[in-house]
Image: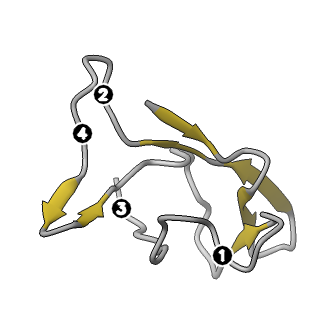
Amino acid sequence: MTINLKKYQKVELISPIGNSEIIPINLQIKNAKGKDIGDFSGNICDVYQIITNIKLEKGNYIIKMKNTFSSAYLPNVLGVGVIIEKS
């Protein structure tokens, strides 16, 4: 199952020289066989997903998470974080 958040959730990546890229998010919560892909702890599920796999030039970037959902929060989402890994 995929929750289509493209309408509501976006990541903005701003490069060191000020170029901006908007990345829409499709949150994958189940694999093709219908099995949950998250790590469960009680009734909380952590889901990790790659939103982009691009080579970043050296420098300081700004990452903004944008919620354009019409409510104050996105149902069933308790938090969002960003992990940047060197490849």
Q: Residue 73 carries which label?
A: 1
The residue depicted at 57 percent of the width and 65 percent of the height is 75
Q: Which residue has dot 2 on it? A: 31
Could you classify mark 4 by the number of other residues whose Cα lies within 10 Å: few (under 14), some (14-19), or many (20 or more)?
A: some
- Expressed as whole percent of the image width and height from the top left, the position of residue 51 reads 53, 48
Determine whether 70 is above or below 36 in the image.
Answer: below
Could you classify mark 1 by the number of other residues whose Cα lies within 10 Å: few (under 14), some (14-19), or many (20 or more)?
A: few
Q: Identify the amino acid type marked 2.
A: Asn
* Secondary-structure class at tag 1: loop
Q: Identify the amino acid type marked 1.
A: Tyr
Q: In which quarter of the image is the N terminus?
A: top left
Q: Is residue 19 left or right of residue 34?
A: right
Q: Which mark is residue 86?
A: 3
* Marks 2 and 4, the one that precedes in the sequence: 2
Choose mark 4 or mark 3, whichever is in front: 4
* Marks 4 and 3, the one that precedes in the sequence: 4
Choose mark 3 or mark 1, whichever is in front: 1
* Marks 3 and 1, the one that precedes in the sequence: 1
> Residue 85 versus residue 77: which sits nearer the camera?
77
Q: Is residue 40 left or right of residue 44?
A: left
Q: How far apart in space, not on screen, are marks 3 and 1 (Cα)?
A: 31 Å
> Residue 66 versus residue 84: which sits nearer the camera?
66
Q: Which residue has dot 4 on it? A: 36
